Image (cartoon, rainbow, N blue to C red):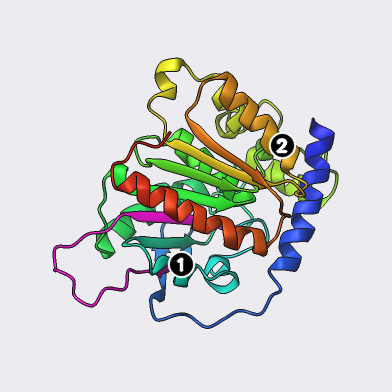
Amino acid sequence: MRTRIVLLVTLLISATFVQAQQTAKSLGPNVSEHKLTSALMGRDMPYRVIAPVEKSVAKDTRYPVIYLLHGLTGHFNNWTDLTKLSDYANGYKVIIITPEGGDGWYTDSVSNDKEKWESYIIQELIPEVDKKFRTNAGRNQRAIAGLSMGGFGALKFGLKYPDKFVLAGSFSGALGAAQITEKTLPGAIGKTIDGIFGPVESETRKSNDIFAIIRSITPEKAKTIPFIYLDCGTEDFLFQNNREFVNLLVEKKVPHEYRQLPGAHDWKYWDKQVQEFLQLADKGFSGTPLK
């Protein structure tokens, strides 16, 4: 399995890098860019906001929130620049946040005190958004999803912080990230991953390995975590990795929805699937049980 993961990550990096070279489009009328001065990260952290477009809104109106995470080698502006997300969002009364995640796998680095990507999003960004914008801050009105590296991050956040999210989603997720080491992936990439997660059997690896989290889950705990949504294209090099994770969800009887359909690891696929997630999130926010 480790050999497969090494190959997958190597392909992942090249694929997401090529996709990120596409020409960026200008911000739409419902998109704004902001910066949070982060004490944890020691610098200003950018993020974008897609706000609902409504002609007349009462001052006390509040909206559910979706956090969308980017992939490896990507940035906070990818979702708004490389998809029609801002157009799709017009059909929903929801606030969408696209944070910066660097190449940090949405995890607090064991070797760099200023690379606390998990703590930044959970402890600083979410409270900042709830304070600055008219959000409905309850758990049942907050969802998180992401592509590739962001898919791993979104499912990890959902599993580790079930009190904060009603729904966690992954598109083409790099779900085996915490199992990679420099030994299995020699060179700068493996070294960087070791710098984030630490040595094999480290507590950071164990606590961020979503396969391990699901394996250890009890029937009682399975009822408390967010509903899990994941999809992957049948031509994606991460397809088997996603199938393995889904099989584990089935084995542990974790409520989820999985879709596999023709598609590769690219923005054409993600542009289509984010529309599906918006529909599912809207359903969840309305109180309709997700099954």
Label 2 crowd (10 A; few <14 / some 14-19 / many >=20): many
Q: Residue at x 43, y 53 (%)?
A: 279
Q: Type of residue at label 2?
A: Asn
Is residue 40 at least partly visible in the picture? no
152 relative to 66, above or below: above
Where's the C terminus, which quadrant?
Answer: top left
Q: Residue at x 52, y 61 (%)?
A: 100
Residue 206 - label: none
Is residue 12 at least partly visible in the picture? yes
Q: Which of the pair 9/85 is nearer the observer? A: 85
Where's the N terminus, which quadrant?
Answer: top right
For marks 1 and 2 on the same chain, the one whose residue lies earlier in the sequence: 1
> CB atoms at circles 1 and 2 under 8 Å apart?
no
Inspect the magenta stretch and tell me whether residue 65 lies in it: yes
Q: Identify the magenta region.
A: 49-70
Q: Type of residue at label 1?
A: Tyr
Residue 88 - label: 1
To which quarter of the image does residue 94 belong?
A: bottom left
* Kind of element beneath mark 1: helix
Relative side of 136 to 38, left or right: left
Residue 241 - label: 2
